Amino acid sequence: MATANKLIITCAITGGVHTPTMSEFLPVTPDEIAAQSIAAAEAGASILHLHARDPNDGRPTPDPAVFLQFLPRIKQATDAVINVTTGGGLNMTLDDRLAAPLRVKPEMCSLNMGSMNFAVFPLADRYPSWKYDWEEPYLRGTADFIFRNTFRDIERILRTLGEEHGTKFEHECYDVGHLYNLAHFVDRGLVKPPFFIQMIFGILGGIGPDADNLLFMKRTADRLFGSDYRWSVLAAGRHQMPFATQAAMLGGSVRVGLEDSLNIGKGKLATSNAEQVSKIRTIVTELGYEIATPSEAREMLDLKGGDLVDF
């Protein structure tokens, strides 16, 4: 296959963890999310991983009506693969998290491959004041928070979005056990190759951002899945660019974006998602790697195509 060795850049535009106080550049309104998504695609991102925010105060929202204020605009302006979260924001129910994906039936959705402690409460100690009153308790509450995706939850997502609507997934694996959870669904025939694994490092509650862990996750996936999968790496915060670079050198794809890190360098906020895409694109192309276009990414991941979504 001509695309076999090409690298996919995913950009996670806003997420459900960082809050407006942390960066003036974090996109919050539908206009901001659309504009930054389009710019990220123009900079080289083939997949756009998308959450929605309440435009009034920036808190994560599962409301399909908010998603529909930016998804069609992004689709009209770019050929990028639109990937809608099923993780949503902290404390959302599974029904909340599925509301928008089931409404818009995208080519891709993210899918966290297990329940886990998902802790970002240390971030709250960095800020002496807050732009909105929801931000500090939202972050501090993660000291007693479990992100829920049971085997039954995952099966529901795979059946309703995957089997019924042809959506494929960014299988988010925050630890080695998540790879084995994925293998369970592969063995049952609920996940079919080629599937896309996003290995995630540096979230408190998940596997740590150590190079040995990257190699171990990759070797474990190779043992479980052989040539049936494609893989990508994201790492939180300051580990973002170094881990992405290491992944590329091992034959993987990469994910950047303001969901995962607010910075472009030590102590320097990124002014946009496109700035991060441009930086990792420069790094990997200088190392000799080719970047997949959106159409090539669709071929590599066997996606249904942008004409079969519902927005």
Image (cartoon, grey):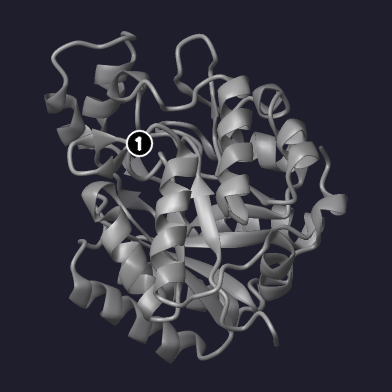
Type of amino acid at the residue the image marks with label 1: Ala
Q: How many marks?
A: 1
Front residue (pair 307, 251): 251
Q: Position of residue 262 (x, y in %)?
A: 32, 37
In this rendering, is residue 243 above or below 311?
Answer: below
Q: Position of residue 311 (x, y in %)?
A: 81, 37
Asked whether residue 256 appears in the rendered view, the answer is no
Would residue 104 appear left or right of 17 to someone viewing this image?
right
In this rendering, is residue 126 above or below 174?
Answer: above
Residue at far right of view: 307
Would residue 121 appear left or right of 60 to someone viewing this image?
left
Residue on which disc 1 sits: 270
Q: Residue at x 76, y 41 (%)?
A: 75
In this rendering, is residue 254 above or below 278?
Answer: below
Q: Residue at x 36, y 45 (%)?
A: 260
Query: What SS does tag 1 mark?
Result: loop
Would residue 139 appear left or right of 97 to someone viewing this image?
left
Residue 162, picture quadrant: bottom right
Q: Residue at x 33, y 43 (%)?
A: 261
Asked whether residue 105 appears in the rendered view, the answer is yes
Q: Position of residue 40 (x, y in %)?
A: 56, 44
Residue at far front of view: 286
Q: Position of residue 309 (x, y in %)?
A: 82, 47
Front residue (pair 58, 164): 58
Q: Residue at x 73, y 48 (%)?
A: 106
Residue 47, picture quadrant: bottom right
